[in-house]
Amino acid sequence: MPHVENAQRHAGSTRSGAITATATHPETATGRSVGAAVSRGGWLAATLPVAAVVSAVAVLLLALRVGGALTQSIPGLPDPGPVTTWALPVARLLADATATLTVGLLATAAFLLPGDGPSVSPYGYLLRRRAGLAAAAWAGSALALIVLTVSDLLGVPVGRLNVPTVVSYATSISQGQALLVQAGLAAAAAALARAGVSRDSAALAAALATVAVVPPAFTGHAAGAGNHQIAVSSLTLHVLGAALWVGGLAALLMIRRATVLADVANRYSRLALGCFAAVAVSGMANAAVRLGTPAQLWQSRYGWLILGKLAALLILGVFGAAHRRRTIPQLRAGRRGAFTRLAAGELVVFAAAVGLAVALSRSPTPVPDPGTDADPLTALLGFGMPAAPTPGNLLGQPLPDLLFLAASLAGAASYLVGVGRLRKAGHHWPIARTASWLAGILVFAAATGLGFARYAYVLFSAHMAQHMVLAMLVPILLVGGAPVTLALRALRRPTDPQVRGIRQWLLRGVHSPVTRLLTHPLVALGIYTGSLFGLYFSDLLGTLMRSHLGHVAMLVHFVASGYLLFWVLIGIDPGRPRIPHPFLVLIHLAAMMAHGFFGLALMQTTTVIAPDWYTSVHPGWASSLLDDQKLGAGIAWAFGEIPAAVVMILLVRQWIQADQREQRRLDRAADRAEATGEDDDLTRYNAFLAAAGEQEARRRPTR
């Protein structure tokens, strides 16, 4: 691989001290061994990519035929031609494959492989280079998908499309916008992957690639499904889990040295287990929405493809169990052959599953899109108009969002595991902190998943109540749980000091310049109060409400901005700045005044906020839009009083406790000084004042 060796040599000559010469110069013994080990894959390296491609394409073509996506064109209707018909699913397959490879290679280089100080390891460097190529191919595939999708939608062959039509689709239609965003993020990940050697930049590139996987999930089959709160969110979890799972396995097969591979494979197996659970649960949830009834699983062509994916998932689960029981122990003993053969077979099955997934995205579903239903409201909301609110309707008729539900379960489970690990080690963790965290998780899950969430879509007053709960009550409870402190005490250090575990990344995060900027009191206050006025006194609210991605991002921002402000004010976790308590009291008073002014300004406005949205979803049993808006303004003005008072009490209490701790410290210092005959801080300070007074007296002129 001369191009890899030249790149390594160039990287070693253009940076100073970021990575050792052994890792960057192929003329050294270690550099030659790593380069040769990666280059020489034998028959497996030559045949595995071919086998994976053949498996994916063959399954894709068969599944397209079985699923009914390759139907014969109807005379008289627009036909995009055979090029688009065949190239579109192939381009989708290529985009999915390169996306998966990019995410897996970058995540392995940044998080699974040991590093070389602040830099990635030699293997990590090679994985970054290959990830850059895969990301560039991914960006090109996404752009090609834009052109092919326009051709398919309009029924016009590719050669007859004009540039303005394609540009209009990419900038005005949600599907085109998602592909354009994906192409841009993939291109950024490609540039970042090949731009440096640090582990921080590798982690940033991996984060960009992971985010780039998401946008199309919000605009495909699932986005048009009834109850798209489940369909879209489950598809998002599905593609993220699959990308990390499959891409990580492909990265492992590029590591030829068994001594390095053993530890990496062990860390990957834990990641793969979580991805397997996420893919299985999210896949079943999405299939349930798209199939409608269990009978469609064997009565419809779409259901047959689902059964094929289920079979592939079960086979992959067997592969994973075999890895954990047999091949990883053999790797520790220096025998790599069994792992390589099993992983190669697993990757071929993965390729077939990707082909099935692409075919599913092109196949008609048993449950038609709500756009074809008589009720346009279902197409817009994902559910029908709820009845007039009653206590039973608000608490019943749940509307769970799988992203929020998964985050709630993961947050509660990981916290309890951390507490259990501390107690097992004989350490104490306050029960009040555990209760505060779990209460915050429970309130968050209730506000985003119970029947109340339905009314937050159609009533401004319900939306405002949800906003206040998520931005004030939930963050205060979560901050009281001190999750960062618990994580730093409970997380174990990796056995290899060159591996950055979750604890090390968390420490780097809380002490990073970005965190220092965001936790400045004025910055945190500006984010919290600025979002109140920016969201409701502009057209932003209506735009976000029309998109499931926008709605999810808005709710996440409510919690994040509130958590940031209250972490600065009353948090006890490390990473927050040390600020005098009087200044914190002033910041809190400023937040209270801004919140009250926002409520009053909202009550006095005579213009309906987000009129396009609320006019289209306004219930017949509700009061007028302006009356409901004034009710929401009253909720915003009144809701903050009790949480603000609680925060003020906590601030004053912390102030008193800080003064008491300082006084105890001074008392201990005075006791030590009295016992040893040395001056303490107070004595030295009094002596300084006396000397200053004498000096000032000598300077005064005598009369």
Image: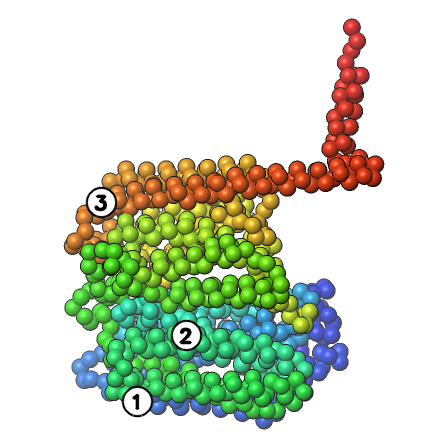
Pick out the residue farthest to the top: 703
Of the two numbered discs 1 and 3 on the same chain, state the one appearing first in sequence. Answer: 1
Of the two numbered discs 3 and 2 on the same chain, state the one appearing first in sequence. Answer: 2
Q: Residue at 79% of width from left, 38% of height from top?
A: 673
Q: How is the image coloured?
A: rainbow
Mark 1, residue position:
66
Figure check: 256 above or below 10: below
Return the mark for residue 238: 2
Q: Amino acid at mark 1?
A: Val
Give the number of the mark in front: 1 or 3: 3
Distance of label 3 from label 2 (alpha carbons): 41 Å
Q: Secondary structure at mark 3?
A: helix
Task: List x then y, in percent, for residue 311.
Answer: 40, 88
Q: Could you say which is closer to the camera, residue 660 or residue 575?
A: 660
Mark 3, residue position:
626
In the visual, does 399 lie left or right of 196? left
Q: Residue at 71% of width from left, 83% of height from top?
A: 33
